Image: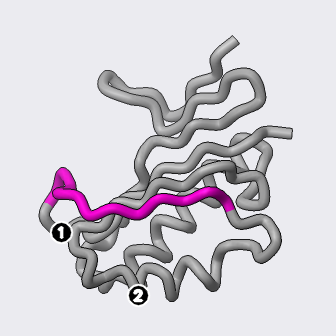
Amino acid sequence: MIQRFDSGPRMSEMTIHNGVAYLAGQVAEDTSADIVGQTEQVLHAIDDLLKLAMTDKTNILRAEIFLADMADFAGMNEAWDKWVPQGATPARATVQAKLARPNWKIEIVVTAAVP
């Protein structure tokens, strides 16, 4: 069985199958924020979706981080390091990418185990 959350005509915010939650790319709502603020917003959205899946950030298997500008790498890591649970850090990749909207500085995709 596949569970779909916040499904629309184009995508779902999250799907769960065989004990794994797949989150869509999460982006900031307040695009006037700097990279730290946008990253914090995205991480909060991830926390909310994981809670909906009855899991949490300690069960994240992989994170894919897309930055509009690699000059924001240090600022993103500042927010990430405060959020990520020590001893349960996931596999992670960070790349520079042209994001779908010019005001987005960051997009994060995560995959998490659902115990």
Q: Amino acid at mark 2?
A: Ala
In the image, taking residue 62 as reference, residue 73 lies left or right, namely: left
Measured as percent of width and height from the top left, residue 12 is found at 45, 31
Identify the image quadrant of residue 56: bottom right
Q: Look at label 1 and name its amino acid.
A: Asn
Q: How many marks?
A: 2
Mark 1 or 2: in front is 2
Q: Report the residue at 50% width, 34% height from top.
A: 6
What residue sits right under mark 2 in the picture?
A: 74
Where residue 50 sits in the image (x, y, percent)? Answer: 67, 50
| Mark 2 surroundings within 10 Å by alpha-carbon count, few (fewer than 14), some (14 through 19), many (20 or more) | few
Residue interval drawn in magenta: 90-101
The quadrant of the picture occupied by the N terminus is: top right
Q: What is the residue that sits farthest to the top in this orientation?
A: 1
User: Compared to 63, does 83 lie above or below?
Assistant: below
Look at the numbered disc 1 and give the secondary structure of its residue. loop
Q: Earlier in the sequence, mark 1 or mark 2?
A: 2
34 within the magenta span: no
Position in image of residue 92 (x %, y %): 55, 59
Name above or below for residue 114 compared with residue 70.
above
State the residue lying farthest toward the right: 115
67 displayed left or right of 88: left
Q: Is residue 98 magenta?
A: yes
Nearer-the-camera pick, 61 or 115: 61
- The residue that appears at 60% across and 82% down in the rendered structure is 81
Residue drawn 38% across and 75% down?
38
Does residue 66 lie above or below 19 as drawn? below
Q: Does residue 16 appear to the left or right of 56 in the view shown?
A: left
Which element carries disc 2, helix, strand or loop? Answer: helix
> Which label belongs to residue 103?
1
Res. 10 image quadrant: top left
